Image: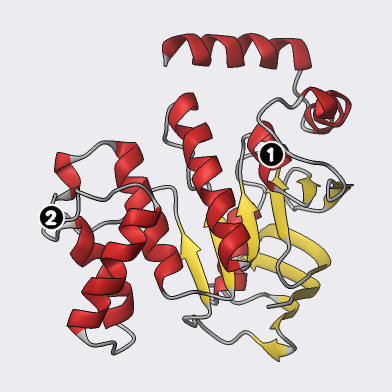
Amino acid sequence: MKLSFKNVEKHFSALHVIDDFSREIDDGELVALVGPSGCGKSTLLHIAAGLETASGGSMLADGRPIEGPHPERTLMFQENALYPWLTLVKNVALALEFQKVDKLEAGKQAREWLAKVNLKGFEEYYPHQVSGGMRQRAALARAFISRPKALLLDEPFGALDALTRMTLQDVLRQLIREERPTVLLVTHDVDEALFLADRVLVFSQRPAVVLREFNLTHHEKTHDLSEFAGIRRQILELLGINAAQDEVAKSIEGAEV
């Protein structure tokens, strides 16, 4: 699915959130949005999902105006949003049941997807009985089970510890390789953006404009991001973050895992 933003603006009363944003996200491409908190990244994602309406400009999916939510475009939040009274398999199956898929078939596919995210054996567990990382694996399975053409990710691993986050990044990348959706990812983690994305857009303070775009399609990605040191430093500088201080924060976070 190709996503096209044309001169998109967003206002909430007197609050100007997004200013004249134009970009095209190609079919099967993963684009990461990084920027200060409150600059409008998530709002742009909600416009793409059809949950918000742009104040100006247009948002197209495969050339058609986005006029509301659609199963072809799935939005995944930082909170896993699993129903606590349903088992993991029933939570995942629900995505298909909403689309009128037979319950037995939905349950069968849900078990297959839970196995894909390494949750085989935990199908009948309730959300409170498993870890945060396992709940987010189930949320990934639920996001992918309907095979959306576009996946809109709003800080999906932001609440997880560093090690769990890296593990889930690997799972996500493998699922993306298999299913090939178009992905728009909002993240505050610059390393996550560098590891997952084909392109990174760095946003300014509100009202959001793109300060710079980085194309990463020619790189072979691993969690050793040393080859991205220069790009990482540039992104941090654009965000007003001291690279040395960020390294100290990362080392402290890693020590706490």
Distance of label 1 from label 2 (alpha carbons):
33 Å
Instruction: Indicate left or right for 175 with 7 as reference.
Output: left
Look at label 1 and name its amino acid.
Phe
Q: Which picture quadrant has residue 6?
A: bottom right
Image point 70% across, 58% down: which residue?
Answer: 30
Q: Which picture quadrant has residue 19?
A: bottom right
Image point 14% across, 41% down: which residue?
Answer: 129
Residue in front for this viewpoint, 184 or 6:
184
Element type where label 2 sits in the image: loop
Residue in front for this viewpoint, 51 or 222:
222
Q: Position of residue 229 (x, y in %)?
A: 83, 23
Can residue 80 be seen in the rendering of this structure? no
Instruction: Indicate left or right for 22 with 253 as reference.
Output: right
Residue in front for this viewpoint, 7 or 139:
139
Element type where label 1 sits in the image: helix
Tell me: residue 36, above or below residue 31: above
Q: Position of residue 17 (x, y in %)?
A: 68, 57
Q: Which picture quadrant has residue 66?
A: bottom right
Mark 1 touching mark 2, by CB under 8 A?
A: no
Q: Position of residue 125 (x, y in %)?
A: 14, 49
Any mark on residue 124, and which? 2
- Report which residue position mark 1 lands on: 195
Quadrant of the frame with the N terminus: bottom right
